[in-house]
Image: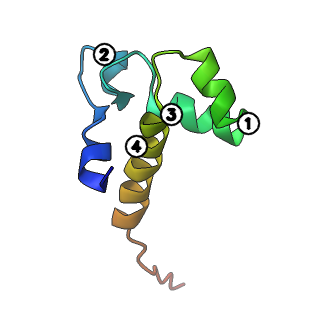
Amino acid sequence: MNTENLLSRITVNPKVMVGKPTVRGMRITVEQILRALAGGVTVNELLQDYPDLEQEDIQAVFAYTVNLVDEEQVFPVEISA
């Protein structure tokens, strides 16, 4: 599945989870998936715990996150006394 197709799985709707990015409009947020994975939950465990999730949804979460990090810009700030 290409990146564009993966990203189409991430949806934002102000009426679902207060507008946080979710997976395919479900009440499963990108943040929930990332926190679970960062906390040591495996992809297989996530897929078992959330039967509506698909492997491509996990890939979509990573693709979405890569886009956010890619757009991040850091500017040097000089502080003078």
In terms of depth relative to the viewer, which is nearer, 43 or 67?
A: 43
Q: For the residues marked 2 and 3, what is the alpha-carbon distance in whole angstroms?
A: 14 Å
**Image position, residue 71 (x, y; %):** 33, 64
Mark-to-mark CA distance, 1 and 2: 24 Å
Residue 58 % position (x, y): 49, 38
Q: Residue 40 occupies which quadrant of the picture?
A: top right
Of mark 1 and mark 3, the one earlier in the sequence is 3
- Residue type at mark 2 is Val
Instruction: Name which of mark 1 and mark 2 comes first in the sequence.
Output: 2
Along the line of sight, which residue is nearer the eye, 38 or 79? 38
Residue highlighted by disc 2: 16
Asked if the residues shown at circle 3 and circle 4 are in contact, with their CB atoms under 8 angstroms apart, the answer is no
Q: Where's residue 23, x and y in %? A: 38, 28
Q: Amino acid at mark 3?
A: Glu
Q: In the displayed structure, would residue 70 be above or below residue 23?
A: below
User: Circle 3 is placed at which residue position?
Assistant: 31
Q: Quadrant of residue 67?
A: bottom left
Nearer to us of marks 4 and 1 is 4
Q: Earlier in the sequence, mark 2 or mark 4?
A: 2
Residue at label 4? 60
Residue located beneath label 1 in the image: 39
Q: CA distance from mark 2 to mark 4?
A: 18 Å
* Quarter of the image where one finds residue 46: top right
Q: Is the residue marked by circle 4 packed among few (<14), some (14-19), or many (20+) residues within 10 Å?
A: many
Query: Could you tell me if the residues under marks 1 and 3 are in contact, i.e. CB atoms within 8 Å?
Result: no
